[in-house]
Image (tube, helix red, strand yellow):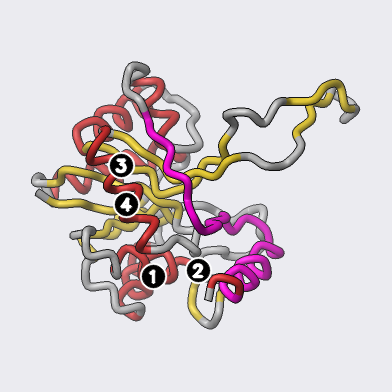
Amino acid sequence: MANVAVIVAAGSSRRMGFDKLTALLRGQPVLAHSLRAFQNCEQIDHIVIVAASGRQDEFQQLAQKAGIDKLLAVVAGGEERSASSWNGVRTVMEQCPSAETIMIHDGARPLITSDAIRLCLACAQQHGAATLARPVTDTLKRADENDVVTASVSRENLWRMETPQAFAADLIVRACRHAVEQQLVVTDEVSAVQDYAPEQPVHLVDNPCPNPKITVAGDLALAEALIDIQS
């Protein structure tokens, strides 16, 4: 039985103004940092990259340059997150039918660690579905259409979702296929599982290290600062 990581790297980086996946973080592409964390995790057997259409060869070369020898395939993504995830998990089952657990990770979260991957994987293997997350600690407010505060929002039991998100292979394959068939707009795979199998509990794994997503240019500076703190 195998554990396979699907790295979703099919975004357009519209909000960044430049390519966040190949932007340099400590001299290496952002995507390379994510790939190496899974490469260095002994429990991960294979890696599939989901790239924007037309960038498969580019990311294949990026992975080779980064020393990724667990690479199973680089496939094209779709216009929506659900289509990209479906292309990734479908490829896993076509090329590695012995897959037992599939982890899906945002390639633009470069601070993921092998230790955090192991924690999430172990939880998913025990419960069927798990995700890295962090409790919300900020003060939250609700606003009206004019951006005027209308109410406070309790932080109790609120979590910031992160990746990887890990699932029993048969569960996430069915959930991703369902999301595509139903044309669901989902921003993560937990949402797809919740819609397909609401009875399936998804366990939260508190990530001991911040794992922010690179979304705007300032996030690169934040990521570098966090690397310094965690070193």
The crowding category of the residue bearing disc 2, from other C-alpha atoms within 10 Å (few below 14, some 14 to 19, many at least 20), is many
Tags 3 and 2 in contact by the CB under 8 Å rule? no
Instruction: Tell me the residue that label 4 is attached to.
Output: 6
Instruction: Indicate whether 202 appears above or below 32.
Output: above
Q: What element carries label 1?
A: helix
Where residue 122 appears, as percent x and y from the top left, is 27, 47
3D distance between C-alphas at marks 1 and 3: 34 Å
Report the amino acid beneath label 1: Glu
The crowding category of the residue bearing disc 3, from other C-alpha atoms within 10 Å (few below 14, some 14 to 19, many at least 20), is many
**What residue appears at the point 26 percent right and 43 percent down from the top-left corner?**
89
3D distance between C-alphas at marks 3 and 2: 27 Å
Sequence-earlier tag: 4 or 2: 4
Q: What element carries label 3?
A: helix
**What residue appears at the point 20 percent right and 51 percent down from the top-left corner?**
3
Sequence-earlier tag: 1 or 2: 2
Compared across the picture, whether 226 is left or right of 166 comes to: right
**Which stretch is magenta?**
202-228
3D distance between C-alphas at marks 1 and 2: 14 Å
Where residue 207 appears, as percent x and y from the top left, is 47, 51
| Residue 123: image tag | 3
Q: Is mark 4 on a helix, strand or loop?
A: strand
Instruction: Tell me the residue that label 2 is attached to.
Output: 30
Sequence-earlier tag: 3 or 2: 2
Q: Which of 74 and 89 is in front in this view?
A: 89
| Residue 13: image tag | none
Where residue 106 appears, as percent x and y from the top left, is 45, 52
Instruction: Tell me the residue that label 1 is attached to.
Output: 58
Instruction: Indicate whether 76 appears above or below 182.
Output: below
3D distance between C-alphas at marks 4 and 1: 17 Å
Report the amino acid beneath label 3: Cys
Tags 4 and 1 in contact by the CB under 8 Å rule? no
